[in-house]
Image (tube, rainbow, N blue to C red):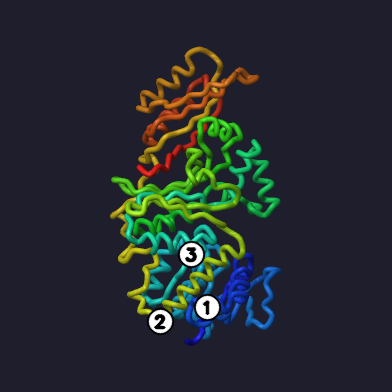
Amino acid sequence: MKPVRVGICGLGTVGGGTFNVLTRNADDISRRAGRPIVIEQVAHRSVHPDCDITGINATSDVFEVANNPNVDVLVELIGGYDIARELVLTAIENGKHVVTANKALIAVHGNEIFRAAHEKGVIVAFEAAVAGGIPVIKSLREGLGANRIEWVAGIINGTGNYILTHMRDEGRAFEDVLAEAQALGYAEADPTFDVEGIDAAHKLTILASIAYGVPLQFEKAYTEGISRITAEDVEQADNLGYVIKHLGLSKRTDHGLELRVHPTLIPKERLLANVHGVKNAIAVMGDAVGPTLYYGAGAGAEPTASAVVADLLDVARDISTDHRYRVPYLAFSGIDDDSSQLPIMPMEDIITAYYLRLLAVDRPGVLARVATILAEQGISIEALIQKEATEGELVPIILLTHRTKEKQMNDAIREIESMADIAGPVTRIRVESLSEGE
């Protein structure tokens, strides 16, 4: 069969890895695809030092690749929103299939891109957009196709997981571990996307759409970062039998879908609680299969390239198939922009348990007043730790509550923080058991 000709846009970490995997494993890839997959052209501003493109048709203009009539599949690895969107839509308009690792592009512009691709009858594949080399999209879209998905919970940002792991193992402060992560190249100079949960929210948006058959709705995802987590919180969570993880979580409920990213206390015995360092893991609960876990490298040159090339294999196999008989982009047929079938729930309607940490003046009646405020909001206390007073005669108080609605907790926290005997803001971290019954 005639070769599938690929144009790679971007030869940085992932692009260089993709180029190397395609060339190094060309024979095995061709046997799996049933036809050769060859690199027709590359576009780059700089070349990864491990990548030798001698003899390859190269350009600095990515749109030259999108308009090259000899390119069958455009691989978008430049990242970002605007230029990547224009590039992908241009390739689609020219009848080219697209493979991308760009989670931001898919989460924000995916609905538009998939409509354009459907009209042109071309494939858009994006396995590498979520969790690097872990084949979770294919698992959700195909392997778990018989299931009604109940919830998806994932550690889907390696930088945040690295920071929380070292805070727990070494008792260090957030700022200290972040600086180390930056020095090691795990965190960007501006770490906002990672530590504030934006990167994880992009990925969770994609997973939820595939799991539940709804349009991509990144703008409705609740996002909270880990920058306010202290070594004290990590220690107290451990004392209570929990581990703090920066979790992306989506659940199907009677009222709609939960879509949220935030620090979360997870029981120590759960598999997700034991995912350390820069690794990623996604747990999925299906009604037929039960709980499943997908674990591995969530980033890096060749782990991510593994997913990119796997998508190229799928494209090579399906390139001659009528688009009506291909696996739908987001797993379900007939997804449109009408999200009323399964609305995304506002965060205030979410029900979960909570960990609270506050500093109170060491005098009689303060703890009783805090308990009264919680009780008035219908919030019951499961566990309480009151430590010795600090030098300023402030007593750290740790509370673990039973499950309650977020709005009630917000109201309670506002009232507690207004008390004259409470110093500073109350730290609040949500608690999830992630048990099979949830």
Compared to residue 139, the image places residue 247 above or below, namely: above
Identified by mark 3, the residue type is Glu
Residue at 58% across / 47% down in the picture?
A: 276
Task: Pick the residue in front: 437 or 318.
Answer: 437
Identified by mark 2, the residue type is Ser
What is the distance, in whole Å, between disc 1 and disc 2 at their CAs?
A: 20 Å
- What percent of the width, then of the height, locates residue 246? 52, 45
Residue at 47% across / 48% down in the picture?
A: 248
Q: Which residue is mark 3?
A: 127
Residue at 44% across / 18% down in the picture?
A: 369
Q: Which mark is residue 320?
A: 2
Q: Are marks 3 and 2 in contact (CB under 8 Å)?
A: no
Task: Pick the residue in front: 416 or 169.
Answer: 169
Query: Mark 2: few, some, or many residues within 10 Å (few <14, many ≥20)?
Result: few
Query: Mark 3: few, some, or many residues within 10 Å (few <14, many ≥20)?
Result: many
Q: Which mark is residue 66?
A: 1
273 left or right of 437 in image: right
- What percent of the width, then of the height, locates residue 17? 62, 68
- What percent of the width, then of the height, locates residue 198? 52, 51
Nearer the observer: mark 1 or 2; the answer is: 2
Identified by mark 1, the residue type is Ala
Quadrant placement of the C terminus: top left
Q: Which mark is residue 105?
A: none
What is the distance, in whole Å, between disc 3 and disc 1 at their CAs?
A: 21 Å
